[in-house]
Amino acid sequence: MRSITTPISDDVIRELKVGEPVLLSGIMVTGRDAAHKWMIETFIKQTHEPKEGDLQVYEELKRLLNGSIIYHCGPVVSGLDTKDYKFVAAGPTTSIREEPYQADVMKHFNVKGVIGKGGMGPKTLKGCQEVPFVYFHAIGGAASYIAQSVQKVLGVYKMEFGVPEAMWVIEVRDFPVVVTMDAHGGSQHAVIDDNSKKVLDALLAQPY
C-alpha cells in the first residue's frame, strides 16, 4: 500500500493507477453539494456576488486546496458549543451529485484528489486527465473507523451551510482509500457499469 502526503505533485498523481490502495496523510478539506455550488457560482462562473467574508475564505481555500484533496463528507462533529471540534463519524458521501461541478472546481483550485464513494462520470474523468487529479474511493459504512484517521480539525468555513455541508479543514494520517479513477482515463466504475449491463442484457435475452 502506497503512502502519500499532501500537497501532492502532478508526477505522483500520474503514477497512480486504478486499483492501487493508498494511505493518505496531510491536510484536506471536506465539501459537498452546498460548497461545490457556492464555489462554482461565486468564484468560477461568478453568477453570484460574494457575500461578506467570502473573498477571505476564497483566498484561504486557494492556499489550502492547492495540491490537496476535497473529501465528499458530511461529518458528525462533537464540540460544536466549545469549538473544540472532533470528528466522531466521517464516512464518504455519494459523489455523483458533484458531477456537474467537480472538474471545474479541481481545475480552478488545482486540487489533486477527490475522495468519495460510488465514483463519478465522464466529465470528471476527463478532468482527471486534464488537471490532473484522481478519484479515491473510501469505505462506505465505516464512518467511525475513518474518523480515527482524522488527527485534528484545523478550522471550518461556511458554517452557515450547516455542519454536514460546511467546509471542514482536517489533518489526517493513514486515511485508507483506493484509486478508482486515474489520470490516464481509467475508471473502475465505468468497467463495473459496462460489465453489469452486459450481464443484465444477457439475462433479459434469455427465454422464459
Image (cartoon, rainbow, N blue to C red):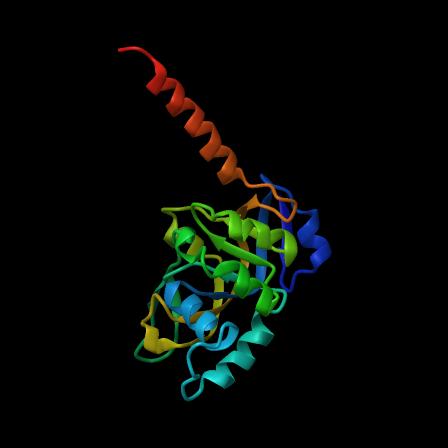
Nearer to me, 173 or 197: 197
Whether residue 69 is visible here, answered yes or no, is no
Nearer to me, 75 or 124: 124
Q: Is residue 157 left or right of residue 79?
A: right
Residue with the most extreme left position: 208
Nearer to me, 53 or 97: 97
Q: Quadrant of residue 132?
A: bottom right
Indicate the position of residue 61 as horizontal and vertical percent values. Answer: 53, 75
* Residue depicted at 44% across the width and 84% down the height: 50
Number of callouts in the render? 0
Q: Judge whether 208 appears above or below 72 on screen.
A: above
Nearer to me, 105 or 139: 105
* Residue depicted at 38% across the width and 53% down the height: 143
Q: Judge whether 182 appears above or below 5 on screen.
A: above
Indicate the position of residue 30 as horizontal and vertical percent values. Answer: 45, 65
Indicate the position of residue 103 as horizontal and vertical percent values. Answer: 54, 59
* Residue depicted at 49% across the width and 81% down the height: 57
* Residue depicted at 42% across the width and 29% down the height: 197
Residue with the most extreme top position: 207
Whether residue 39 is visible here, answered yes or no, is yes
Q: In the rendered view of the protein, which quadrant contains the N terminus?
A: top right
Q: Judge whether 45 appears above or below 89 on screen.
A: below
Indicate the position of residue 104 as horizontal and vertical percent values. Answer: 54, 63
Q: Judge whether 24 appears above or below 196 on screen.
A: below
Q: In the rendered view of the protein, which quadrant contains the C terminus?
A: top left
